[in-house]
Image: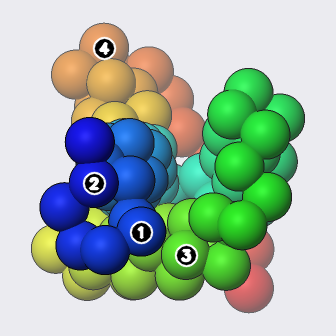
Amino acid sequence: PHIFGNVDVSSFALLGATAFMGGAMRITISLCAILLEITQANRQLPAMMLVVTIAKAVGDRFGESIYDSHITLKGMPLLEQRP
């Protein structure tokens, strides 16, 4: 079904999933590559890149990634980053 002219509803679902995964996991380029390979939606690549960049920036601003949360919960030692 089409909502906004020639834009398919599946495009919104793809961009929503991209935003969720980009914000929760903080992966950008690999996420775009994986979703592009799975869906073959070449026309959606610029929108996916924009959405994942914004989601990562918002996620970095407001909290830590899901991987960092799991490391903290399990009490595992974490090597600090060097500048």
Amino acid tagged 4: Lys
Q: Which of marks 1 and 4 is nearer the N terminus?
A: 1
Amino acid tagged 1: Asn
The residue at 19%/61% (across/down) is: 3
Write down the residue under mark 2: 2
The residue at 63%/64% (across/down) is: 44
Q: Earlier in the sequence, mark 2 or mark 4?
A: 2
Q: How crowded is mark 4: few (under 14 residues within 10 Å), some or many (20 or more)?
A: few
Q: Which-is-in-front pick, marks 3 and 4?
A: 3
What whole-number distance in Å separates the C-alpha atoms at marks 2 and 4? 46 Å
Where is residue 30? Give x, y as percent: 77, 48
**Disc on res. 74:** 4
Residue 38 seen anywhere in this rendered image of the structure: yes
Find numbered disc 4 in the image and state the secondary structure of the residue it sits on.
Answer: helix
Find numbered disc 1 in the image and state the secondary structure of the residue it sits on.
Answer: loop
Write down the residue under mark 1: 6
Q: Which of 63 and 37 is in front in this view?
A: 37
